[in-house]
Amino acid sequence: MATQALTQQNFDEVVTSNDIVLVDFWADWCGPCKQFAPTFEASSDEHPDVVHAKVDTEAEQGIAAAANIRSIPTIMAFREGILVYNQAGALPPAALADLVSQVKALDMDDVRKQIAEAQNTQN
């Protein structure tokens, strides 16, 4: 499965309407981004049940700002519309495969419970 470009127009819909979405924030001038691109593409082929999406931070500065992107590449993982992973830096193939496995294995009821508890603690 090929990667999908995310824009201001489709970002929210893609993230909320798919079970698992990995997002690669990148730019054309970024050497590490270009080196990571084949790894991300290969992961999309290995995991057709996971949406692999890319945000060009130059073309989509609004998304990059909203996501508080300070360094690229940055990888984010969303599960059921909830951000469950956010880290700058390219991942080697084995680490990206491990991330996908961990996101698939998450107990989302537990994740939602932890979020609710954290919100209650802040109030």
Image (cartoon, rainbow, N blue to C red):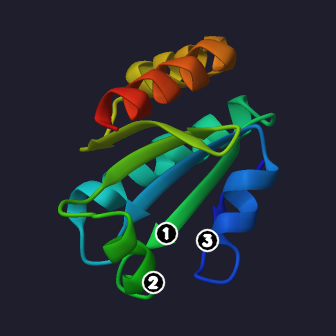
Which of the marked residues, 2 or 3, is nearer the chain's N terminus? 3
Residue denoted by label 1: 55
State if disc 2 and disc 1 touch (CB < 8 Å). Answer: yes
Q: Where, quadrant-wise, is the C terminus in this rendering? A: top left
Q: Position of residue 99 (x, y in %)?
A: 48, 23
Is 15 displayed left or right of 33 in the figure? right
Whether residue 27 appears in this view of the structure is no
Mark-to-mark CA distance, 2 and 3 = 8 Å
Residue denoted by label 3: 6
Secondary structure of the residue carrying tag 3 is loop
State if disc 3 and disc 2 touch (CB < 8 Å). Answer: yes
Mark-to-mark CA distance, 1 and 2 = 7 Å
Q: Position of residue 114 (x, y in %)?
A: 48, 19
State if disc 1 and disc 3 touch (CB < 8 Å). Answer: yes
Residue denoted by label 2: 60
Secondary structure of the residue carrying tag 1 is strand
Disc 3 residue type?
Leu
Give neighbour class at mark 3: few <14, some 14-19, many 20+ (Cα, 10 Å).
many
Q: Residue at x 54, y 15 (%)?
A: 102
Which of the marked residues, 1 or 2, is nearer the chain's N terminus? 1
Disc 1 residue type?
Val
Give neighbour class at mark 2: few <14, some 14-19, many 20+ (Cα, 10 Å).
some
Is 51 displayed left or right of 63 in the figure? right
